[in-house]
Image: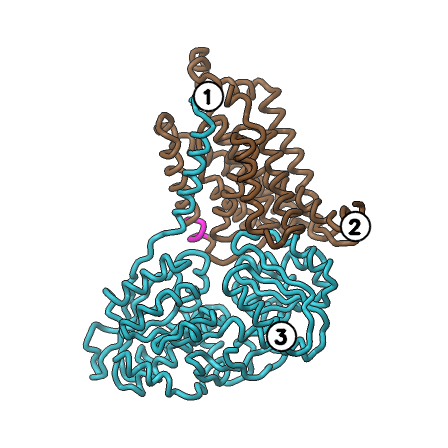
Chain colours: A brown, B cyan
């Protein structure tokens, strides 16, 4: 048992790193869809915007570049979310598919613009100085940057959870999910709440893009791959649940890392196999948001 | 209101999202009528030849398409826009990523484009998918990239020629070389699709035939593998003395960087099929790629007069080093011109016959090559990534000799 653990320690650790990254990526999608009822298929494209910003500010050369990329990405994400909120408002009472088509269209436009601006070549980004080396884990080298991702993911999870569950802003958000008319009647403009939630959700996507750039790089098509992963995490975790997004991301992180290391022949099926299994056992995901289904 | 929605409807929404996402893969592809030279009639009495250039202009293979276009354009420019006395009209069509866009593009060229010959095609499935149509239409097609064995083997057609390579040809050269070096057990990895499987099979056959042993193999999910760590730990546990892989594009960048990040580069030397370090991916890989050894039928560093001249002209025209994709299109133009001259007309049957009788092509940047089974029998080079004053290049270590399609 101990020998098995030793042999797979790097894979388990890597599962946590990928899981942390997936959490930052998916939690935005989850709160936007679970709380504001907007299925944002442009989430992957926003992520790719973040990755390309990391390329622009040569995030690998200095901490200045890396932090600038993070800051600019956060602002761009907030603005993009606000714009998206305005654009989806007229469709608020239409079926979800209409919104999905709108956001899908936005994602195609964004991806095309990125390809015009940055070209079609694959770009890579080094980790910032100090994190670009490797540390020794059980006799194998493990990239330092990925270790840092685990910490960043956990801190962000705690912050988002505290904001939604323990602050008055979070209470307002939860209230407008539960009963929009009642919140309006109390004199609060629930469109503002929607702008805020979409802004923060989209910001999490662009920030995740910057954080992921040293691992995944930036290239055309990455947006779709990433969106699919985020959707899987959200479906497994349950919509609108911070805890669900965290658990879903960690499960998928381990499936993609430890699962593939143990069962390399099943690598193609293991992700969607897990998804199917969860849907059979818990059709609403492991932790469906309690506000959304009260 | 969300709380009125059942879980089923929500998931239905998600399902629709995934579905629409999948649908975006099927983008359009149109005939971009980029005409060169004058209209019909030509001028000097030679007439015109209409050539369809089928290259990816959208999707993941776009950089390859750009290189092929540049190789094609450069040849035409150097030869006054004429092939064997005929004025060339190029009709460009977008191949897209796969047969779903590539096959209709070729179909449109045949029906509406009124082409006499076609050049291009990156994707093997597309090349195999159009073989029947071009045979029926009797329009010669010179495949300028797709490397599947079947194109000039099981699915061979007298009208389908190839100016590039075959997957196993490149891999077998490395297999023979490593077996002769006696490097020890080798771990083999490739993406899990037709080309990856052919490379693995080609390498394994040649390496074991030379007395080598395979330490293990992994076929990674194609297009959905961003993180190679789970497979890299498989290499570490296998006792391999070296690793041989085939990756291209984004996967090549991720693989080479992660191979260095996880410390394997220092313990287990990395070998590969040349596409691992070819073209723009090499710049993205950066220092992680230095020292990686690959086999390919071309390198900018090949020392012959034709190549020196070609590399210089290409750099002057486009401000970057040429790639094997550019050379394949450049050579396709060369053989098509020779065939047109030989045949003296644009009839498909005569052109195909002329292509078969060309013999050795002696002025190619890749060195001399000839058609055997309608695909190049050519020298394969052992290359090593080297940093030359800040520019990464595939320096030529050794000419491994001439290899036919296995």
Left or right of B19, for residue A269: right
The answer to whether residue B175 is visible is yes
| In magenta stretch: residue A115 | yes
**Neighbourhood count class around disc 2 (C-alpha, 10 Å): few under 14, some 14–19, many 20 upward:** few
Judged by depth in the image, the label closer to the viewer, 3 or 2, is 3
Q: Do the residues labelled 1 and 3 touch (CB within 8 Å)?
A: no
Q: Give the range drawn in magenta.
A: A113-117
Left or right of A217, for residue B133: left
Q: Tell me the element at label 3.
A: helix
Residue at image coords 23%, 83%:
B46
Pointer 3 chain: B
Q: Which mark is residue A138?
A: 2
Q: Do the residues labelled 3 and 2 touch (CB within 8 Å)?
A: no
Q: Residue B170 carries which label?
A: none
Res. B103 image quadrant:
bottom left
Q: Tell me the element at label 2.
A: loop
| In magenta stretch: residue B328 | no
Left or right of B81, for residue B98: right
Asked if both marks, 1 and 3, belong to the same chain, the answer given is yes
Q: Are marks 2 and 1 in contact (CB under 8 Å)?
A: no
Please name the residue that numbered disc 3 is placed on. Answer: B175
> Relative to residue B401, is residue A64 depicted above or below?
above
Q: Residue B3 carries which label?
A: 1
Label 2, label 1: how many angstroms apart (C-alpha)? 49 Å
Label 1, label 3: how many angstroms apart (C-alpha)? 62 Å
Q: What secondary structure is the magenta-colored segment mainly?
A: helix
């Amino acid at each position: 048992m101990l020998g098995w653990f030793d042999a797979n320690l790097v894979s388990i650790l890597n599962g946590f790193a990928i899981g942390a990254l997936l959490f930052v990526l998916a939690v935005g999608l989850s709160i936007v869809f679970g709380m504001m009822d907007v299925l944002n298929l442009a989430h992957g494209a926003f992520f790719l915007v973040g990755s390309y910003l990391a390329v622009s500010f040569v995030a690998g050369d200095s901490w200045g570049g890396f932090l600038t990329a993070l800051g600019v990405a956060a602002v761009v994400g907030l603005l993009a979310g606000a714009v998206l909120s305005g654009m989806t408002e007229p469709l608020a009472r239409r079926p979800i598919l209409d919104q999905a088509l709108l956001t899908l269209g936005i994602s195609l436009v964004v991806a095309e613009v990125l390809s015009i601006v940055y070209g079609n070549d694959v770009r890579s980004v080094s980790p910032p100085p100090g994190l670009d080396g490797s540390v020794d884990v059980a006799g194998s080298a493990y990239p330092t940057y990925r270790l840092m991702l685990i910490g960043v993911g956990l801190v962000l999870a705690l912050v988002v959870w505290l904001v939604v569950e323990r602050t008055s802003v979070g209470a307002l958000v939860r209230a407008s999910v539960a009963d929009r008319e009642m919140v309006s009647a109390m004199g609060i403009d629930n469109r503002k709440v929607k702008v805020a939630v979409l802004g923060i959700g989209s910001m999490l996507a662009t920030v995740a893009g910057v954080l992921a750039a040293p691992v995944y790089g930036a290239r055309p098509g990455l947006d779709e791959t990433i969106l699919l992963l985020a959707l899987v995490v959200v479906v497994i975790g349950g919509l609108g649940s911070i805890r669900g997004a965290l658990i879903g991301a960690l499960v998928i992180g381990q499936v993609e890392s430890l699962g593939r290391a143990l069962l390399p022949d099943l690598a193609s099926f293991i992700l969607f196999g897990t998804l199917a299994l969860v849907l059979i056992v818990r059709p609403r995901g492991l932790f469906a948001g309690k506000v959304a289904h009260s | 209101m969300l709380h009125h929605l059942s879980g089923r409807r929500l998931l239905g929404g998600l399902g629709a999202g995934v579905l629409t996402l999948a649908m975006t893969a099927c983008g359009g592809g149109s005939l971009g009528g980029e005409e060169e030279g004058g209209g019909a009639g030509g001028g000097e009495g030679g007439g015109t030849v209409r050539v369809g250039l089928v290259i990816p202009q959208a999707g993941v293979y776009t950089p390859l398409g750009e290189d092929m276009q540049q190789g094609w354009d450069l040849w035409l420019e150097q030869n006054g826009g004429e092939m064997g006395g005929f004025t060339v009209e190029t009709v460009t069509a977008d191949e897209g990523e796969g047969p779903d866009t590539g096959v209709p593009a070729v179909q449109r060229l045949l029906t509406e484009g009124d082409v006499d010959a076609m050049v291009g095609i990156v994707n093997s499935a597309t090349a195999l998918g159009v073989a029947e149509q071009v045979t029926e239409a009797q329009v010669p097609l010179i495949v300028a990239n797709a490397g599947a064995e079947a194109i000039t083997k099981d699915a061979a057609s007298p009208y389908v020629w190839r100016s590039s390579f075959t997957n196993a040809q490149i891999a077998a050269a490395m297999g023979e070389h490593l077996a002769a070096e006696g490097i020890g057990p080798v771990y083999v990895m490739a993406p899990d699709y037709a080309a990856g499987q052919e490379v693995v099979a080609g390498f394994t056959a040649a390496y074991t035939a030379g007395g080598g042993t395979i330490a293990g193999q992994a076929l990674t999910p194609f297009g959905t593998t961003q993180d190679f760590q789970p497979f890299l730990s498989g290499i570490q546990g296998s006792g391999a003395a070296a690793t041989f892989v085939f990756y291209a594009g984004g996967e090549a960048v991720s693989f080479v960087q992660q191979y260095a990040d996880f410390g394997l580069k220092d313990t287990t030397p990395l070998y590969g099929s040349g596409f691992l370090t070819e073209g723009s991916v090499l710049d993205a890989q950066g220092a992680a790629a230095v020292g990686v050894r690959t086999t390919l039928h071309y390198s900018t560093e090949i020392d012959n007069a034709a190549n020196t001249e070609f590399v210089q002209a290409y750099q002057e025209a486009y401000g970057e080093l040429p790639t094997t994709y550019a050379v394949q299109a450049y050579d396709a133009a060369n053989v098509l011109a020779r065939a047109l001259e030989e045949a003296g007309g644009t009839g498909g049957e005569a052109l195909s016959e002329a292509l078969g009788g060309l013999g050795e092509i002696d002025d190619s940047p890749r060195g001399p090559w000839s058609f055997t089974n309608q695909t190049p029998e050519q020298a394969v080079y052992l290359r090593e990534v080297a940093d030359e004053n800040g520019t990464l290049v595939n320096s030529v270590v050794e000419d491994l000799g001439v290899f036919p399609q296995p």
